[in-house]
Image (cartoon, rainbow, N blue to C red):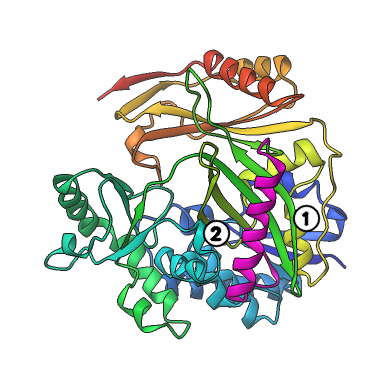
Amino acid sequence: MKRNIFIPALEEQQRTELETVRNAEEFSFHSLLDVKTLVEAESFSFNDLLDKARQELKQTVDSVGSVDAIIAHWDFPTSVMVPILCKENNLPAPPLESVLKCEHKYWSRLEQKKVIPELVPDFCSIDPFASDPLAQVTLEYPFWLKPVKAFSSQLGFKIENEEQFHAAIKETREAIRQFGEPFNEALEYVDLPAEIKEANGNTCIAEQIISGMQGAPEGTMFKGEFNVHGVFDQPVDEGAMLFDRLEYPSSMPERVQRRMIDASKRFLEHIGFDNGCFNAEFMWDEESDQLWLVEFNTRISQSHSEMFIMVDGMSNHEVAIDIALGERPSMANRQGQFPVAAKCLIPQKREDAIVKRIPSQQELAELRERFPGTLVRLDIEPGMRLSDLANQDSFSYHIGTIYLGADTHEELRQRYQACLDTLHFEFDYV
């Protein structure tokens, strides 16, 4: 009998990725709720979503017979819902408090400072609804201002002076409750320290600006055993700037990768995280050799899945399934088609427009023929308005993604540029 694996907001691309895991034929994969409900909703109640997930889970189990595992690979609310659902169904999952200590940006910084203070930038808590929020700022300009819980870079501001601060506070007051209120519902499931009760989901964190090359270890904690199965990086290009991309495996110095891995282990053990997957984001300033911690995510990164397939021959869903089934996790290593791979964003300037044209299927097929293994996912179609795209950051529109494989990191860069030059879009600006 097949074992039933439930994955909230499962997409068709992920179903294809799941086919690469060991013994895939022994599993039956079920989506729990959908992307529109869990990822794209403009407003939601955490408790309502949790109840909907419970009901759908029960209805599906009534027909298939069992729930054998539940896996999260989306951020909040999914990342917090899954540990609750797992506990209710006697399935392995990280303790909810350890997850929330990563999800709440200010709480996470407080815990990080206890165990890896040398990697933590200066920060302070800001109540945007206070009579004088500026009086709470303890940092010098410039600094970042962002909610303790948001999606992507929404409501993230670089603050260079008092005027910008007040403008950001005004915008934050108008929109922060979209995620802040449901996050407050989630926080009610654990006993909070007094300072976190005060710094609730509708508050912000101000942080020192850091810079450098980004690195991202991904790994697991299983019955107290820590392991990393891959390290990614986001290169800083010299000269003509390319746009955001992740590359695997990392080309950062081995000693820097070891420092990131050691810091990840120390922090996760400190907060009691266990029986789950994680990915962490760091920044390394090569000139000063300063390593900074950006954040922890308590799940595998679906952004990494295609690159794992290209380089290692299987998706990172492999370890997520192992742990969710209560089994020791393991991944294949370097059994894929390419020595290196990248996930590259297709950017569009932050100016509203109606989409007139996107690359045709024939053009995409020709690109795959030119660069074997290339996968292009477009998030737009003719007639769509760019401002209607969900969950965009404050700096540019992301209109699609390119997954590439190559023999070297330099060849990845060249192929990415060639793809950007080849893919033809047309817009009517409004």
Q: Is residue 107 above or below residue 264?
A: below
Question: What is the crowding at mark 2: few (fewer than 14 residues within 10 Å), some, or many (at least 20)?
Answer: many
Q: Hey, what amino acid is under mark 2? A: Phe
Q: Which residue is mark 2?
A: 296
Q: Residue furthest front?
A: 288
Q: Which residue position holds label 1?
A: 318
The image's mark for residue 396 is: none
Q: Residues under labels 2 and 1: Cα distance?
A: 20 Å
**Where's the N terminus, which quadrant?**
bottom right
Identify the residue at the far bottom of this view.
Answer: 191
Of badges 2 and 1, nearer the viewer stands 2
First along the sequence among labels 2 and 1? 2
Q: Is residue 38 above or below residue 131?
A: above
* Residue for point 69% across, 38% down: 248
- Please state if 159 lies on the left or on the right of 89 as rendered: left
Percent coordinates x, y for residue 20 in the rendering: 80, 46
Q: Is residue 360 above or below residue 88?
A: above
Secondary structure at numbered mark 2: strand
Is residue 32 located in the magenta-colored stretch of the structure? Answer: no
**The residue stretch that appears in magenta:** 251-278
Query: Is 261 inside the magenta-drawn segment?
Result: yes
**Picture residue at 81% right of the left edge, 51% below the top:** 21
The amino acid at mark 1 is Glu
Q: Which SS does the magenta portion mostly show?
A: helix
In this rendering, position of residue 192 left or right of residue 98: left
Any part of residue 31 in sight: no
Question: Furthest-left residue in view?
Answer: 131
Q: Quadrant of residue 371?
A: top right
Q: Position of residue 214 (x, y in %)?
A: 55, 42
Q: Identify which residue is drawn at 33% across, 73% down.
A: 200
Q: Position of residue 323 (x, y in %)?
A: 75, 67
Which of 333/73 is in front?
333
